[in-house]
Image: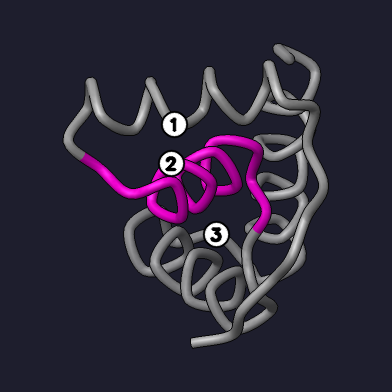
Amino acid sequence: MSRLTITLSEARYRALKEASAQRDKTIGQLIDESLDFYGIKSREDARHLVARARAHSKLTEPKAVAMAQENVRAVRRKS
């Protein structure tokens, strides 16, 4: 697993620390879940998602990719 250093305001750091304690999760887990929520995935994860969508829906690869991209855009627009 890779490590990352980020700079946050003191207020944001305290809020993140408090949220992690309330949810009984680490700060890293909260950040990882947030990235999932925003649809940020590795290329391999995205390929697996498209393969699963194709298997369940009988879509062609181009149609499955287009559907996956639209779903990611929809999630990002909600933010």
Sequence-first tag of 2 and 3: 2
| Residue 78 image-quadrant placement | top right
Q: Is residue 75 shown above or below 48? A: above
Q: Earlier in the sequence, mark 1 or mark 2?
A: 1
**What are the residue bounds of the magenta stretch?**
25-40
Residue 68 falls left or right of residue 53 = right
* Residue at position x 64%, y 45% in the image: 39
Q: Which residue is mark 3?
A: 59
As measured in the structure, the alpha-carbon distance from the residue carrying label 1 to the one carrying label 3 is: 43 Å
Residue position marked by numbered label 1 in the rendering: 17
- Estimate how packed mark 3 is, as few (under 14), some (14 to 19) or many (20 or more) residues with alpha carbons within 10 Å: some
Q: Which residue in the rendered view is the most extreme toward the front?
A: 10
Q: Mark 2 = which residue?
A: 30
Residue 36 colored in magenta in the image:
yes
x then y, percent, for residue 27: 44, 46
SS at mark 1? helix
Identify which residue is drawn at 82% across, 47% down.
7
Q: Position of residue 73 (x, y in %)?
A: 79, 33
Q: Amino acid at mark 3?
A: Leu
- Pick whichever, 41 or 26, lies toward us: 26
Q: Residue furthest left?
A: 24
Question: Quick one: label 2, few (<14), some, or many (20+) residues within 10 Å?
Answer: some
| Front: mark 1 or 2 | 1
Q: Nearer the viewer, residue 32 or 36?
A: 32
Disc 1 marks which amino acid?
Lys
